Amino acid sequence: MTIATLMTFIYAVLSIVGGIIGYKQAGSTQSMISGIIAGILLIIGGIALIQGQPWGAWLAIAVTLLLVIVFIFRLVKTRRFMPAGLMTIVGVITLVTFLPFVSAALLP
């Protein structure tokens, strides 16, 4: 298992747990649904990575990038580190672990 795969699974768990916490604390059904959907997509991407499927990396990159963008906007709006700051930092770290994959895919 590569570090990118491990980070994908970690980010998936954080997404799911964060969505559930958002629902329990604020009653936000939207947080729960989006957290669970994003987490499931990241788990699917991670499983595909383990199986050697390149689309798994692209799925994980796309979902992670989308989440990072959403959480950056949320961090700017709320100016609170939890959960937006944590999810942004972990998302950026996850994206950085994919740099070798992206460079290998894009360079001849």
Image (cartoon, rainbow, N blue to C red):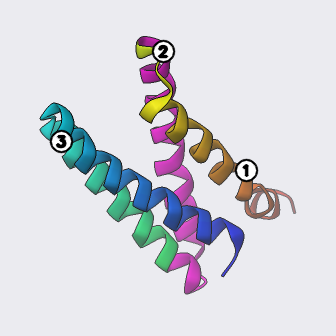
Picture quadrant where residue 7 is located:
bottom right
In the figure, 83 relative to 56: above or below? above
Prevalent SS, magenta region: helix
- C-alpha gap between disc 3 and disc 2: 20 Å
Q: Are marks 1 and 2 in contact (CB under 8 Å)?
A: no
Q: Residues within 10 Å of mark 1 (few under 14, many from 20)?
A: some
The residue at which mark 1 appears reads as: 96
**Residue 17, percent across and down?**
33, 54
**Residue 70, percent across and down?**
43, 30
Apparent side of residue 46 relative to residue 41 in the rendered image (left or right): right
Q: Nearer the viewer, mark 1 or mark 2?
A: 2
Apparent side of residue 80 relative to residue 90 in the rendered image (left or right): left
Mark 1: which secondary structure? helix
**Residue 37, percent across and down?**
28, 55
Quadrant of the rendering where the C terminus is positioned: bottom right
- Residue type at mark 3: give it: Tyr
The residue at which mark 2 appears reads as: 79
- Residue type at mark 1: give it: Val
Instruction: Tell me which label, 1 or 3, sits earlier in the chain.
Output: 3
The residue at which mark 3 appears reads as: 23
Residue at figure coordinates x 58%, y 65% from the top left = 57
Mark 3: which secondary structure? helix
Magenta-colored span: 48-77
